[in-house]
Amino acid sequence: MTRTSPSSHSPDHAPVIVSSPGSFARSVLDERHPALIERVRRATPYPPEQQRALDSLLEEITKGVIERLDDSEPGAERWRDEPYYGQRWPDVPFLWAESFFYRKLLAALGHFAPGPWLGIDPFAPFKNAELTSSKVDEELSALDRLPELPLEERDRTLLLSSLWGNRADLGFQLSAGAGGLGERVTGLVVDDSPALLETLEAGEPGKVCLVADNAGPELLPDLVLADHLLTTRRAATVVLHLKPYPYYVSDATTTDTLACLDRMTRASGHAAEVGERLRQAVSGGQLTLRTHPFSCAPHPYERMSADLREDFASATLTVMKGDLNYRRLVGDRHWPATTPFAEATAYFPGPVAALRTLKSDVVTGLEPRTLEELDAGEEAWRTSGTHALIQFAAR
Ligand SMILES: O=P(O)(O)OC[C@H]1O[C@](O)(CO)[C@@H](O)[C@@H]1O
């Protein structure tokens, strides 16, 4: 990966830029994005106007330079002052390039334009296939064993299933180049779960912010975890942060959340009970769904707006799910992997945890010995989704 000039948050660690051929970031832009355009075309019979817009987007990302979003697009003003227009896609920060690609894909499909395609989620066919799969049936039935477990074991099981649910990332599965997901490795590269749980147990139950990542098989265990936090009084309220519009293929929106609740209540046994309780929690205000525009911003959380900062500052704990949230939490930078997680997140306004399977180059908080072992083992441990971590920083 190439490096560009450093910036304020971590002067020594440059942002991840796409350019070097052969880098992970480059493979996402060169392989994953064009493949995704084709999958979207095949999944939904978009009319000629949208087909032509997809052709132009494909041409732009493969051969052209970055072109602005049309001013008529909702939220276009948030993208207007970015410094990257006219540059080649591989020459700008990875996080920005990926985010802008997803926003342009929605523009090409008329997602925000009044008319018949308004609000149609281009990724819905993939998400629906996952949510209706028999694998999900099995996972929901497995919940029947949950009430028998002692509390400590339930805590751990639910944290781990929310964590490993993060492997359910359609971006990965749709990828032609990445070779899909490898076998998951048992054991976490960092496990701060005892400190995380201690924070939730200390003092009166407060608010927990759960910043969701993917829909379906990841969101289901996230919702079960939210129910567990509420029913065990680890949290008085949970705020579930969702994406305001379809993003990074499988990221969870409000529609996806309602689909999960529906899936649970239509199941039997414990899953149905949890689903019903969660519906009531939404109606009663114990579980709030929040879709902040910054959730789809191409920036690290260090640049979050004052109202979002206030939400996280007033929480007992914020849990960031998944790889993209991790990249945004620590900044998508070339951190030395042994940089303490607390240092990389020092700006964060409250206690924060990350539950993440590793699917991109960025990582912090590793013990030197762990890093040595990982580097000596499987080559792509940072990006293959085989390893995972639970990190926590108190404030
Ligand atoms: O769904 P997750 O865990 O956020 O993973 C999404 C990840 O997929 C990628 O788009 C490509 O791997 C990463 O850039 C991103 O971090």
Image (tube, rainbow, N blue to C red):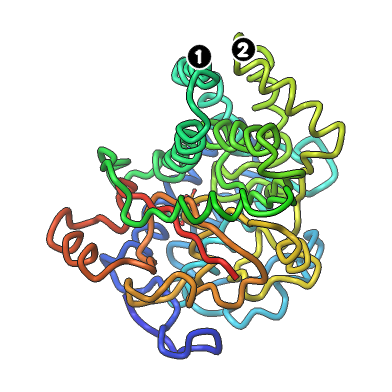
Tag 1: residue type? Ser
Q: Is residue 232 visible?
A: yes
Q: Quadrant of residue 100?
A: bottom right
- Across and down, in percent, residue 226 comes to 65, 38
Q: Quadrant of residue 285?
A: top right
- The number of callouts visible is 2
Callout 2–callout 1 Cβ contact below 8 Å = yes
Q: Nearer the viewer, residue 28 or 200?
A: 200
Residue at image coords 59%, 53%: 319
129 sits left or right of 103 in the view: left
The answer to whether one can see residue 43 in this image is no
Drawn side of residue 288 relative to residue 319, left or right? right
- The quadrant the C terminus occupies is bottom right
| Figure quadrant of residue 168 | top left
Q: Which secondary structure, mark 1? A: helix
Side (left or right) of 270 relative to 354? right
Residues 86 and 389: in front is: 389
Amino acid marked by disc 2: Ala
Which circle's residue, 2 or 1, is located before the other in the chain?
A: 1
Percent of width and height locating residue 162: 50, 39
- Decide if residue 300 is on the left or right side of residue 360: right
Task: Check the image and report above or below for 88 versus 221.
Answer: below
| Residue at the far left in the pictured view | 376
Q: Secondary structure at mark 2?
A: loop
Give the residue displayed 86% in from the left and 31% down from the top.
Answer: 283
Quadrant occupied by the N terminus: bottom left
Q: Which residue is mark 2?
A: 267
Q: Residue at x 69, y 32 (%)?
A: 231
- Distance from disc 2 to disc 1, alpha carbons, whole Å, reads 8 Å
Residue assigned mark 1: 141
Q: Residue at x 12, y 61 (%)?
A: 376
